[in-house]
Image (spheres, rainbow, N blue to C red):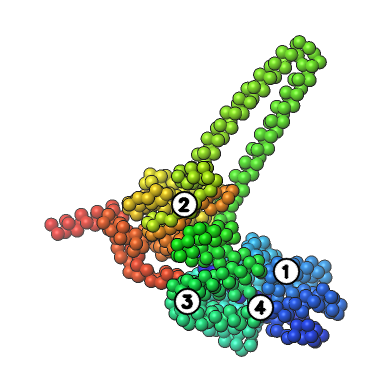
């Protein structure tokens, strides 16, 4: 997944220009007065000195806190000052500052990776802006909400909110934030819709405005974003030149968040040029800077890039270590249903555990009562004591049987989570070594329009429908001797040729894929009222991977490597009801299946790649018989 990058908005109140006394103080303590739109280290240090020493006239505290909340490069400190601003603004009933505080609070939470709380903060601001008819504030908030939907990969809402914001900010004659919104929409078209030409048109418009306003931060972002568009078009020389200049300018401004993103892109550019020394250098710089300022998304992206690089350099141990770090930071926003299901399972388990404790305590109390009565009553009570001891014996025996059954269930559960060979190694050694497999086949599926369905269905209907399909997919995998890896939201991933090496893994995978497609089509014909009917896309690739166990408490068997990324691209480039395969898989199955060459198709970060549709055996046989009849 590509790193996330958006230009941050600033809610400047009409009354919030720095007074002359503050400019003088900044010159004395900071050495310079940087443009207030940039996150400048000198400016932040000077502002913090002014705030902590209270070197400002009475009544200017709200303005100082707003400057600190927006300009501070550390998201934790920015969040701290945003919350102080929000509390003070509410106490003074200052609507403008309340909205500004909620917006910057959301920005800081977003950079820290807390997407849900960020959205809550933004929508609180939207509610106030609508009620108070503050259109400009509403436009800024719509822009930041669009940024969050972009992270969640909700493309429809992302474009919707950007266009709403652009219309409002244009009417309000807010040139700076209008240009910033254009730039962010261009960033969306470039990175998430793979439309670099459309993006460059938007960057050209926004760049002209930044230049007219003499805004250094906007110009720096514009340089970097244009570089990313050139990278998408395959012009790596121009891309590297633009991104290098952007990093240089942003370093001068002290704006570290976009630098992390651009450094990761520089690593990607050099990796494509096979200059792995430079690629490692840029990825490690990105990770160090992100860790220094607590930028969680960027920490995850840098670790993922390092994992990919170590995999290319055939160092599975380091690759696995960085992949584990990536997994610990990656966003779970797109898996809300899965998280809720896990939470319910955990709650049920904890309730069951508490009930066992209560039952044991009750049994202990009964036993103690029997003993006490036996001591006071005599021989008659001894009989009752014996009876109590007999019941205790039966309880212990039944408890042992329960323990044995639970142990057996645990063994089965472990085998459901991990391949048998891996489970045996884990139980024997307490850990599993990462292994490299030179030839496996990976399959990805997803449901077309799943996000739209998810927004209109109840959680119960959504989980029931997905479970219906995935349970059948599991049966198909088991039937063909393939290994299910994981599900992420509506995506299903499996692999063949591991943990036991085989020569026909590609053929097995294609056969399983046809069964999946047939099952989905059959389910649509049934037209059950309880189930949601989906269209499915399937993508397959073959090649080397590294496999291992991720996690120390909740184990997960996973695979990673460039072959996995290509398989995912095959799925996203497929069509509903079709099986799209790479050239590597085609070479392994062409003797068994009729395939139609689709030509070379552009794949993000990979360039042009050959792709093939595998024709359904039934369709192919009917077409062949009809052709034979015509010849006869």
Residue 118 visible in image: yes
Mark 4 vs 1: CB contact within 8 A: no
* C-alpha separation, residue under disc 4 versus residue under disc 3: 25 Å
Crowd class of label 1 (few under 14; some 14 to 19; many from 20; radius 10 Å) = some
In the image, is 525 to the left or to the right of 178? Answer: left
Residue 527 percent location from the top left of the image: 43, 49
* Residue at point 70%, 84% (across, down): 34
Q: Which is more toward the observer, 289 or 379?
A: 289
Residue 206 visible in image: no
Crowd class of label 3 (few under 14; some 14 to 19; many from 20; radius 10 Å) = many
Crowd class of label 2 (few under 14; some 14 to 19; many from 20; radius 10 Å) = some
Total marks drawn? 4
Crowd class of label 4 (few under 14; some 14 to 19; many from 20; radius 10 Å) = many
Considering every residue shown, the one lying at the far left of the view is 632
* C-alpha separation, residue under disc 3 versus residue under disc 2: 32 Å
* Residue at point 52%, 60% (across, down): 318
Note whether 466 is above or below 44 in the view shown: above
Going from the N terminus, do you reach mark 4 or mark 3 first? 3
In the image, is 571 to the left or to the right of 264? Answer: left
Q: Which residue is mark 3?
A: 231
* Residue at point 45%, 65% (across, down): 312
Going from the N terminus, do you reach mark 1 or mark 2 first? 1
Disc ID at residue 485: 2
Mark 3 vs 2: CB contact within 8 A: no
Q: Secondary structure at mark 2?
A: strand
Q: Which residue is mark 4?
A: 254
* C-alpha separation, residue under disc 1 versus residue under disc 2: 40 Å
* C-alpha separation, residue under disc 4 versus residue under disc 1: 15 Å
Going from the N terminus, do you reach mark 3 or mark 1 first? 1
Disc ID at residue 77: 1
């Amino acid at each position: 997944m590509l790193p996330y990058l958006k230009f941050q908005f600033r809610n400047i109140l009409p009354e919030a220009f720095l007074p002359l006394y503050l400019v003088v103080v900044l010159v004395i303590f900071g050495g310079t007065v940087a443009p207030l739109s940039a996150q400048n280290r000198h400016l932040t240090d000077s502002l913090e000195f002014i705030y902590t020493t209270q070197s400002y006239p009475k009544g200017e505290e709200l303005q100082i806190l707003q400057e600190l909340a927006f300009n501070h490069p550390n998201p934790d400190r920015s969040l701290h000052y945003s919350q102080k601003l929000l509390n003070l603004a509410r106490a003074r009933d200052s609507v403008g500052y309340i909205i500004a505080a909620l917006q910057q609070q959301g920005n800081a939470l977003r950079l820290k990776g807390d997407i849900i709380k960020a959205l809550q903060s933004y929508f609180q601001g939207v509610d106030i802006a609508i009620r108070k008819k503050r259109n400009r504030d509403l436009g800024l908030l719509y822009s930041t909400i669009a940024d969050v939907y972009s992270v969640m990969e909700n493309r429809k809402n992302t474009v919707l909110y950007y266009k709403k914001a652009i219309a409002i900010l244009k009417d309000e004659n807010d040139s700076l934030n209008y240009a910033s919104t254009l730039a962010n929409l261009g960033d969306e078209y470039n990175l998430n819709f793979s439309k670099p030409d459309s993006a460059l048109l938007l960057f050209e418009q926004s760049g002209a405005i930044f230049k007219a306003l003499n805004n250094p931060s906007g110009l720096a972002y514009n340089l970097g974003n244009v570089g990313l568009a050139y990278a998408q078009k395959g012009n790596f020389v121009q891309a590297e030149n633009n991104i290098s200049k952007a990093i240089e300018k942003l370093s001068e401004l002290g704006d570290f968040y976009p630098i992390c993103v651009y450094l990761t892109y520089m690593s990607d550019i050099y990796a494509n040029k096979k200059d792995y020394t430079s690629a490692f250098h840029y990825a490690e710089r990105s990770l160090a800077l992100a860790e220094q300022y607590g930028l969680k998304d960027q920490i995850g992206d840098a670790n993922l890039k390092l994992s990919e690089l170590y995999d290319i350099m055939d160092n599975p141990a380091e690759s696995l270590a960085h992949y584990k770090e990536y997994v610990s930071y990656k966003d779970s926003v797109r898996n809300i249903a899965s998280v809720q299901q896990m939470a319910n399972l955990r709650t049920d388990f904890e309730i069951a555990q508490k009930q066992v404790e209560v039952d044991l305590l009750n049994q202990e109390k009964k036993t103690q009562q029997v003993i006490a009565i036996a001591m006071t009553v005599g021989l008659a009570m001894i009989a009752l004591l014996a009876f109590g001891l007999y019941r205790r014996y039966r309880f212990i025996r039944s408890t042992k049987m329960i323990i044995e059954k639970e142990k057996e269930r645990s063994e089965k559960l472990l085998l459901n989570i991990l391949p048998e060979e891996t489970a045996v190694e884990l139980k024997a050694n307490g850990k599993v070594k990462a292994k490299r497999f030179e030839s496996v086949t990976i399959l990805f599926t997803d449901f077309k329009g799943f996000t739209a369905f998810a927004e209109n269905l109840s959680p119960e209907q959504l989980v029931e429908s997905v479970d219906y399909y995935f349970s059948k997919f599991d049966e198909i995998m088991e039937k063909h001797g393939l290994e299910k890896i994981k599900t992420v939201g509506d995506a299903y991933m499996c692999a063949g040729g591991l943990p036991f090496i085989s020569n026909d893994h590609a053929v097995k995978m294609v056969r399983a894929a046809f069964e999946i497609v047939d099952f989905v089509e059959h389910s649509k014909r049934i037209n059950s009222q309880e189930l949601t009917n989906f269209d499915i896309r399937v993508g397959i690739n073959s090649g080397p991977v590294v496999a291992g166990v991720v996690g120390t408490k909740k184990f997960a068997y996973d695979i990673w490597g460039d072959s996995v990324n290509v398989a995912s691209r095959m799925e996203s480039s497929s069509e509903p009801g079709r099986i799209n395969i790479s050239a590597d898989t085609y070479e392994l199955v062409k003797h068994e299946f009729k395939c139609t060459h689709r030509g070379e198709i552009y794949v993000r970060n990979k360039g042009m790649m050959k792709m093939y549709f595998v024709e359904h055996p039934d369709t192919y046989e009917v077409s062949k018989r009809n052709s034979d009849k015509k010849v006869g």
